[in-house]
Image (tube, grey):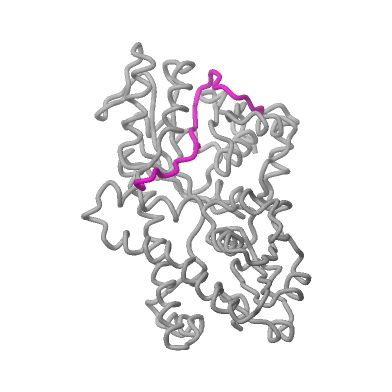
Amino acid sequence: MTVENPLFKTVSVIGLGYIGLPTAATLATRGPEVIGVDIRQSVVDRLNEGKAHFSEPDLAMLLEAAVKTGKLHAVTEPQPADAFIIAVPTPFLDDKSADLSYVENATRALARVIKKGDIVILESTSPVGTTRKICDWIGEERPDLKLPLDGRAGDVNVAYCPERILPGRMVFELVENDRIIGGMSEACSQRAETLYKLFVRGALLRTTAATAELVKLIENAYRDVNIAFANELSVVCEKFGLNVWEAIALANRHPRVNILSPGAGVGGHCIAIDPWFLISAAPEETALMAAARHVNDSKPLHVLDRVRKQLDRFKQPKVACLGLAYKPDVDDLRESPALQITAALADEGFEVLVVEPHVDELPNGLAGRKNVIKCDLDDAIHQADVVVALVGHSSFKNVSRDVLLSRSVIDAVGLWQH
């Protein structure tokens, strides 16, 4: 459904990755002309052909329609618009603090074309205070503009509105999930809310920019702590020779207990990174979060140790690594513990049979290696001495029990526990 809104005839989305591209395609179906900006020429060329550069349900259809109707096109440099949404990466540096260089570069680039009345919205997960820095960077580039500092209205509006979407459900959750609207002033929050009303059905919850920044970090740190508890339980159960999935299932029958499932570690661009933005900024106040990060970062090493012990039983062992993605049924390899484990086994010289149905080619670090072969599921299991389930892809669940019983099996994700 197209929603007419004269305030936003043109919207620019800067950063056309896992967040920016679904946002741009969704907005393009709601009325505004959308200008997508990405520094990667190959991505821009592909998008202007109506083709996404990653897999996500419903995105291909949405993108193709947006490009064909002329509502969405991509460029490599910001152009004038009424609203600018920044959705660029925020990785961490060697000291685990946030690398804001992508945000700063995007902000300074758009500042050259911004005009009075426009709004700049940051969606990238960022440390508390980043939205304030956006105002400072715009001010340095455009001293002619009054910025909305300390709650005062300005010539332009600035807000922080974090995304809350899950790979595999991005297009749906962009529309249905509640959104936090954190403006640098009340006027900024009002203007941002008007934009998100174009496509969000969930509640739009206003707060300050700093609180919105903190809330996003809280959400991912909370999940990280809960996953760490499950991962620690898996190590405890292994020590006692018990089945962690059975124990968790029974504990979860308590009406006030809801333990998550353990895995090979924690991956993705959010949970594995975002808690560090709080830990690095307030190290003395975040002991629990730091401990959770240690547990989850050490889990792939624990799985590796289990695999090595099984491989030592064979003279020239072959190991089948099932899954490279950071979570089931997606093609996203960012910060993936499964990829980390597989790469470590390859580095140690073992013959590695990789099964990842959601990617066509092996990633850098594995591609081109003589001891690493991409296989289909049946071939890998039949050739392997040791089978390691690293990701719970749906296509892995129906492996024959008889075939598994004739192999040494390490199930890090509870794929075959039942």
- The single residue placed furthest to the left in the displayed view is 284
Q: Look at 34% across and 18% down and name the residue there.
A: 140
- Front-most of residues 312 and 239: 312
Q: Is residue 101 left or right of residue 365?
A: left
x and y percentages locating residue 275 in the rendered image: 37, 53
Q: In this view, does 406 lie above or below 72?
A: below
Which quarter shows the N terminus? top right
> Predominant secondary structure in magenta?
loop
Residue 228 in picture, x, y percent from top left: 40, 67
Q: Residue furthest bottom?
A: 241
**The C terminus lies in which quarter of the figure?**
bottom right
Rendered location of residue 343, percent (x, y): 58, 59
Question: In the image, what residue occupies the spot 51% across and 53% down?
Answer: 335
Residue range (magenta): 72-96
Residue 281 at x, y = what percent? 27, 46
* Above or below 157: residue 380: below
